[in-house]
Amino acid sequence: MQGKTHWLSVFILLLTQAQLFGNGIEVSNLQFTGEAGNVADLSFTVAWENSWRLDAGPGNYDAAYIFGKYRTAGGDWQPMYFLTLAGTSGNATLERPSAPAPGFFAYRNAVGTGNASFNLTVQWDYGALGVDGLSNVETRIFAVEMVHVPEGAFQVGDGSINGSKFYQGEGELTREPFSPYRIDSEDVIYIDIDNLYYIDSTYSGDQLGLLPAEYPKGFAGFYCMKYEVSQQQWVDFFNTLTPTQQATLDVTGPNGKNSDVVLDRNAVSWDGSSPATTSLPDVAMNYVPNTFMLAYLDWAGMRPLTELEYEKACRGPIIPVPGEFAWGTTNIHGTAYTLSGAGTAAEAITDPGVGTGNAAYSNLTPDVDPLRVGIFAASAVNTTREETGGSYYGIMELSGNLMERCISVGAVQNRSYTGLTGDGRLSETGWANVSWWPNTGLSFRGGSIGQKSSLLQVSDRSYGSYSSSISLSSNGIRGAITAP
């Protein structure tokens, strides 16, 4: 959306109305509505489709994670930190995550389903940032759909060990049957043959060490992005960076897809001077190495999932089913899909599987390319977990489309991870600069458009600890935030 000019007292305010980030989420009516003592009131509406809050079953809700950026006189974009939050429509709960995350959550304050729309007001102390008045201040408000995963015990592993899956060690390497490992607290977990364990393979990990109490194990509540990051989300991020940071994180350069043309449905283009663009804004963003993914999450005030949280996000507290996918069964569609409205926000599958699980994998997608985020929920004949491909908590595409990169338990540098969120700022050269965030040895979970179905299984750890940080057509981005 193009910027609009608004008036407040005698000041001209350039406010970019964002229609950004996701499968039906929109920020509109952005305006300064008051000012006192170098503190400004910033009001806007956030709305999205297919929202819910449940008191049964998963007992969870979805939410908008909202954060802002500002700049003065065309300078560098900086994160906004809000003093107070207020819902003017009376139907929203607003919640701030732990520092240093710069954003906040907005979600339904009562049980219900359907489209959500909240009128919100936040206070911004621009004087504390050295901003001399509101003249020539440009702001952007971003919103991301997320899902709350409640606190609670769960199990990792599914009772089999093919694919280096987790299991409860009982002092011996091979035995039948294998029991999943139960996680019922955030206490220290030892990785050894008597505790949490997995069979050694090329990329499974070192089978050593312990997970400190600070390592997020999935028992504590957290928020997870409902969808994988889209190309429009990436472009919006990239266009707020400095020229130096853009040179580092240029996905069209040699560290990305090394091309400005559409490659495996990555349509991001950048000429080095104009803003980056994409002709496929709703398609999942691929060709980002680990370092690019971490930079995006730091900028947004999020963090990576751990591989234990990944399994919790998929199956919740339900007893694992051997070989299950993110939708909770072993059923999976096996016939190639046909697209309608390809490349548009209405991109859909005309022939989804009925009564079985739907996912983008192997050779089922046109040209073995990623699809738009949320496509199976939009295309399903019946809104079941299987047909939409949804997880226990309503998170989409955790099996298939693009791989989910998580913090592994199988690499020493990963086990120091504390779940600290990004602060909205990158290093001068464009890298994430959050303490204890590793960029190698990550776990690649959930499979992708170019892989066989077994790699889509929730507990598959064939790439449980992958040493490289490379740009692949099957790499995606999904972020998390620890719940307050």
Image: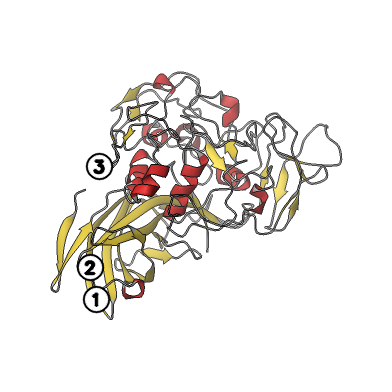
Count residues near mark 2 (Cα–Cα under 10 Å), then give few for <14, some for 14-19, many for 20+: many
- Quarter assignment of residue 301: bottom left
Residue drawn at x 24%, y 58% is: 74
Horizontal side of residue 261 vs 300, given as left or right: left
Please name the residue that numbered disc 1 is placed on.
35
Q: Nearer the viewer, mark 1 or mark 3?
A: 3
Q: Earlier in the sequence, mark 1 or mark 3?
A: 1
Q: Amino acid at mark 3?
A: Ser
Q: Where does residue 319 sit, x and y in percent of width and height? A: 66, 42
Please name the residue that numbered disc 2 is placed on.
32
Q: Where does residue 481 sit, x and y in percent of width and height? A: 51, 55
Please name the residue that numbered disc 3 is placed on.
274
Using the rendered image of the protein, determine whether residue 156 is visible from the camera's viewpoint.
yes
Residues 409 and 70: in front is: 70
Residues 101 and 276: in front is: 276
Q: Amino acid at mark 1?
A: Glu
Count residues near mark 3 (Cα–Cα under 10 Å), then give few for <14, some for 14-19, many for 20+: few
Q: Disc 2, disc 1: CB below 8 Å? A: yes
